[in-house]
Image: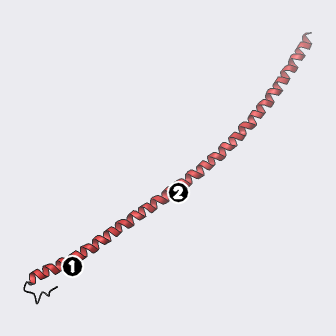
Amino acid sequence: MSNIFTSRDPAGTVVSQTGAIFAVLAAGAMNAHMSGIQAMRQAREGAASHQLRYQLDYAINYSEKLMTVAEQQAAEIVRLRAENERLKTAARTHYESARRLAAKVAA
């Protein structure tokens, strides 16, 4: 590049040097801006990833609790069915005993 003091066209030299300086500054600013945008996207993706992981862990824990409750309820149903059968047998026995007693008294 030529010097503004030794050039035949000092104004043109100043314009070209100033333009070159601004081009370098603009390229640097654009590069910094793009790097900032990429860093922001990565931070957003990281935050979203952490949020999704938290939601997944919460859903897993909740489903495990529901599974435990379901297993307990299934065991309770089995116990109640056995109790129901025992009570049916006892009621049938008492009913038959009462009928026999009523038949004895009537006879």
Residue at point 25%, 76% (across, down): 25
Residue 30 sits in which quadrant?
bottom left
- Secondary structure under tag 1 reads helix
- In the image: residue 77, left or right of residue 2: right
Residue placed at 81% from the left, 25% from the top? 91
Mark 1: amino acid = Ile
Point out the frontmost of discs 1 and 2: 1
Q: Secondary structure at mark 2?
A: helix
Estimate how packed mark 2 is, as few (under 14), some (14 to 19) or many (20 or more) residues with alpha carbons within 10 Å.
few
Q: Is residue 38 left or right of residue 16?
A: right
Q: Foreground: 7 or 90?
A: 7
x, y percentage for residue 7? 10, 87
Residue at 72%, 39% in the rendered image: 76
Quarter of the figure with the N terminus? bottom left
> How far across and down, in percent of the image, does residue 98 sit?
86, 19
Q: Is residue 17 above or below residue 33?
A: below
The residue at the far top in this view is 107
The one of 61 and 98 positioned closer to us in this rendering: 61
Residue type (three-letter) at the residue carrying disc 2: Tyr
What colour scheme governs how the chains and residues are painted in the rendered image of this protein? secondary structure
Of the pair 42 and 82, the residue shown nearer to us = 42
Tell me, for residue 21, which label it has, or none: 1
Residue 54 disc label = 2
Taking the view exactly as shown, the residue that stands out farthest to the front is 1
Figure quadrant of residue 103: top right
10 Å neighbourhood of mark 1: few (<14), some, or many (≥20)? few
> In the image, residue 18 lies at what x, y percent?
17, 79
From the top left corner, tell me how far across and down residue 78 is, in percent: 73, 37
| 62 horizontally vs 5: left or right | right
Looking at the rendered image, the quarter that the C terminus falls into is: top right
Residue 97, labelled with which disc? none
